[in-house]
Image (cartoon, rainbow, N blue to C red):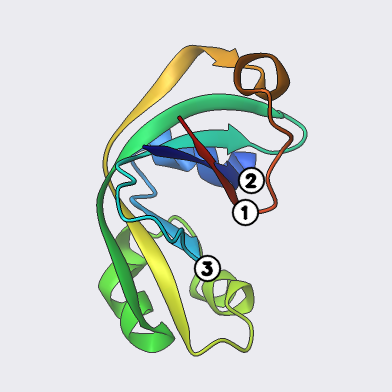
Amino acid sequence: MKVLLSIKPEFAYKIFDGIKRYEYRRAIFKRDNITRVLVYASSPISMVIGEFEIEDIICDELSSLWQQTSKYSGISEEYFYSYFNEREKGYAIKIKTSTQYQNPLSLKEEFKVTPPQSFVYVE
């Protein structure tokens, strides 16, 4: 099964450039059979621009999470801590392989869903 994640365009493109190998989340999906992520680049792109395979999901205290993932975070330490504002733990989705689509997909036409705040399950 796949999930569709809403990701800011600047970070989404870093995933496909290989700069960002971890996608951070304050909350993670409950189902354990998720193997792939569809990347919805939020406004102003507003399209599904690719997907990636999940290698692992790390849940840890923020200082440890940053220490493990910072080299390939694609973000600054300041942004990391502001994103996880007032949380003790966070999640990092480790990206195994990624594929950027030649032709981005429309969320409404292809998937019949509205842009998710965080994520949505897709078949």
Callout 2: 10 Å neighbours few (<14), some, many (20+)?
Answer: some
Farthest right residue?
44
Q: Residue at x 37, y 46 (%)?
A: 19
Mark 2: which secondary structure? loop
Give the image location of residue 117, x and y in percent.
70, 52
Mark sitting on residue 27: 3
* Picture layout, residue 88 above or below residue 17: below
Give the image location of residue 108, x and y in percent.
72, 21
Q: Give the quadrant of residue 42.
A: top right
Disc 2 and disc 1: Cα gap in Å?
A: 11 Å
Mark sitting on residue 118: 1
Marks 3 and 1 in Cβ contact (< 8 Å): yes
Observer-nearest of 112 and 70:
112
Marks 2 and 3 in Cβ contact (< 8 Å): no
Q: Residue at x 61, y 23 (%)?
A: 111
Amino acid at dot 1? Ser
Mark sitting on residue 8: 2
Specify which label sits upstream in the sequence, 3 or 1: 3
Q: Residue at x 49, y 90 (%)?
A: 88
Amino acid at dot 3? Ala
Disc 2 and disc 3: Cα gap in Å?
A: 17 Å
Amino acid at dot 2? Lys
